Image (cartoon, coloured by chain):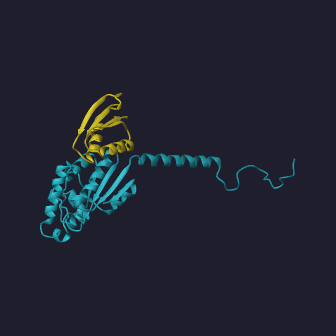
Chain colours: A cyan, B yellow
Amino acid sequence: MSTDTPDAPAENGPAEGAPSRAELAARVDELEDALAEATAEDGGKKMSIIATKGTLDMAYPPLILASTAAAFGYEVTVFTTFWGLDMLHEERSKSLQLSSVGNPNMPVPNAVAALPGMDRVTTKMMEKRITDNDTATVEELLETSLEMGVEFQACQMTIELMDYDEDDFYDGVTTGVGAATAIQDMAEADIQLLV
Amino acid sequence: MSAEFDIAETLDVKGASCPMPVVKTKSAIDDLAAGEVLEVVATDPGSMSDIDGWADGTEGVELVDQTEGDDVYNHYVRKTE
């Protein structure tokens, strides 16, 4: 016997307080179960959009992204609040306006754009372009999105603030939801957007 | 262009612009059986990149071919599962 390792432990067993092999095996089983559960619950991809704008131009981005994400297989929720509600409002969605002031890309100067009736004129111009280019209308995009299973939610607080009625919205729109629902959705989503 | 596949169905989205070519392609592919190929005929130049990206990011579909003619873009998408 060598005397080179005088301090070697007398036994090769686990150190005092370390978990036994059986305890480790049980812990591994537990973790594998938890992993399997988490993977099963989180099967699909999710996207959460918060839509706050109700002008004609700003209704397009959330609707185009929602329908396209649905085509990718995403489970999509669009939570609308304030003027975003108008795109889900059966009557108001058909007459969304384009603002002619505050947009330096408009072909008219702000001083002219601010004249009464100018929003109507610029909206008509845009509507004509939409028709001429065969661009889908807001109504078409909304109906397509609903058919593809996109969930549209209308914020309850702003429904009351704007004095809308729950029956004013398209069939299939979810009402009676608030910020907590939106947060829960965003927390679970792979993509979150505020429009 | 290769013609080593049979076309099960043709979807005409001529005139339609973003996002409709992709959205309608998705709906049409849902009606096919696994292994079948959908032909999509579009006039939207953006459909070249969009249908490619959609097929790449979507499970159960595969882009077989894309061809470009005179203002017409043909896409061939196979349903894989």
Q: x, y (%) of residue B71? A: 25, 41
Residue A70 relative to residue A122: left or right: right
- State whether residue A135 is above or below residue A53: above
- State whether residue A107 is above or below residue B70: below
Q: x, y (%) of residue B2? A: 35, 30
Which quarter of the rendering shows the C terminus of chain A? Answer: bottom left
Residue B44 relative to residue A46: left or right: left
In this orientation, does residue A152 appear?
Answer: no
Q: x, y (%) of residue B67? A: 32, 37
In the image, farthest residue toward the front: B70
Front-most of A6 and A25? A6
Residue at x 22%, y 61% (from the top left corner): A55
In the image, farthest residue toward the bottom: A111
Residue at x 45%, y 47% (from the top left corner): A39
Residue A181 relative to residue A15: left or right: left
In this orientation, does residue A16 appear?
Answer: yes
Q: In which quarter of the image is residue A173?
A: bottom left
Q: x, y (%) of residue A83? A: 23, 63
All told, the count of numbered labels is 0
Front-most of A162 and A137? A137
Q: In which quarter of the image is residue A90?
A: bottom left
- State whether residue B75 is above or below residue A40: above
Residue at x 30%, y 34% (from the top left corner): B38
